[in-house]
Image (cartoon, helix red, strand yellow):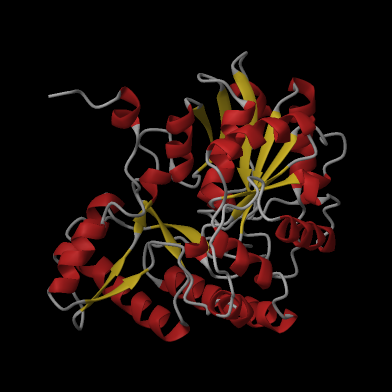
Amino acid sequence: MPNISEKGQAMPASPIRKLVPYAEEAKRKGRKIYHLNIGQPDIATPEIALKAVRENTLKVIEYSHSAGNESYRKGLAKYYQSVGIDITHADIIVTTGGSEAITISFMSCLNPGDEVITPEPFYANYNGFAVSTGVKIVPITASIADGFALPSISAFEKLITPKTKGILICNPNNPTGYLYSREELEHLAEVVKKHDLYLFSDEVYREFCYDGQTHFSAMNLKGLEQNVVLMDSVSKRYSMCGVRVGAIISRNCDVMKTAMKFAQARLCPPSYGQIAAEAALNTPKEYFEGVYNEYIERRNYMVEALNRMEGVVCPKPKGAFYTVVKLPVDDTDRFAQWLLEEFEYKNQTVMLAPASGFYATQGLGKNEARIAYVLKIEDLKNAMEVLEKALLQYPGRKL
């Protein structure tokens, strides 16, 4: 029997999705599961985007330009200009989701064996993108004690080797919900300049910044015009994860020319996804106001509910719609599986994402979990009640 590739063996399973078989079995038993494990908002997609897909008059679904439809890229450039990022449509390549934006960016800028430093816990699929492209993720650990703030610049300096070619950030952060400030990013820019690194900035959650905080884009860091590669997606902004439309944005012409070759190799981004994404650019302001208020209510309720539970520590996220929470359990991987296999309260249970899969440093995150507050407030209230009961009954409870 032929062997599986080394890359295939090294490819990690998703810590967010690996518990799905247990969830499916629980559902077959008739249990109601509250999905706190995945960033799939229950917010309605803007009607203007749905209408554009329903009412399109395409007779042939053709290949688009490899960089994406020009009309969409021009509209997207106006969107970025409206949030203070001064670019043109020539600085944009539309991708098949933010995932492809990251993999093409890595392949365009990095060689196999090159190292990229990123704060941990980090979006778990960065590991998969790194394995796919032969890049090595080097973690720098952030702490729940300070809400997962950016680690010190001296800590970054200690990790830089001749193989270091980039720094990767997610702002606002998935999975922690931390929002990096302009000051933090400007300090980080000093390291990037000093060592002439790429700064890969995943800004998918730009619209989700709370408590009067504002988002500062890495694209606006002075002197880094040739270093910054922005990765973005419409998935969360418009609550349409399934359209699979993202973007690479950079003022570095060599990076964009190289990325274009990879874009040509995969032909083009999805046609209907681009139709929906282009229409979504005209989403009314009221939509975002409603979404913002909804997430504020969910976040405030959930954080307060979690911190009332004995032994639970939950920082208050400044952005996105996640938090990493410390639980009084021996092992959150074991606890998350137990919740689905053995526990029920009023025929309900919850599904969490164990945080160990969001760390690259072995042994970290064993008593932490990522929780997404993407459920309507009634479901979130039930989920918190179920979780509190589960923590009291769990055999591996530790205080």
Q: Is residue 152 visible?
A: no
The one nearer the camera, 131 or 93, is: 93
In which quadrant will I find the N terminus? top left
Q: Is residue 387 left or right of residue 167?
A: left
Q: Is residue 35 left or right of residue 228?
A: left
Picture residue at 23% right of the left edge, 64% below the top = 23
Picture residue at 61% right of the left edge, 67% below the top = 275
- Is residue 365 placed above or below 292 in the rendered structure? above
Quarter of image, res 292: bottom right
Residue 76 spot, x, y in % from top left: 74, 59
Q: Is residue 285 left or right of residue 25?
A: right
Which residue sits furthest top? 162
Picture residue at 83% right of the left edge, 36% below the top = 225
Which residue sits furthest bottom? 378
- Is residue 119 placed above or below 277 in the rendered structure? above
- Count of numbered badges drawn on the protein: 0
Q: Is residue 199 left or right of residue 193?
A: left
Picture residue at 26% right of the left edge, 56% below the top = 19
The one nearer the camera, 280 or 353, is: 280
Residue 94 spot, x, y in % from top left: 64, 50
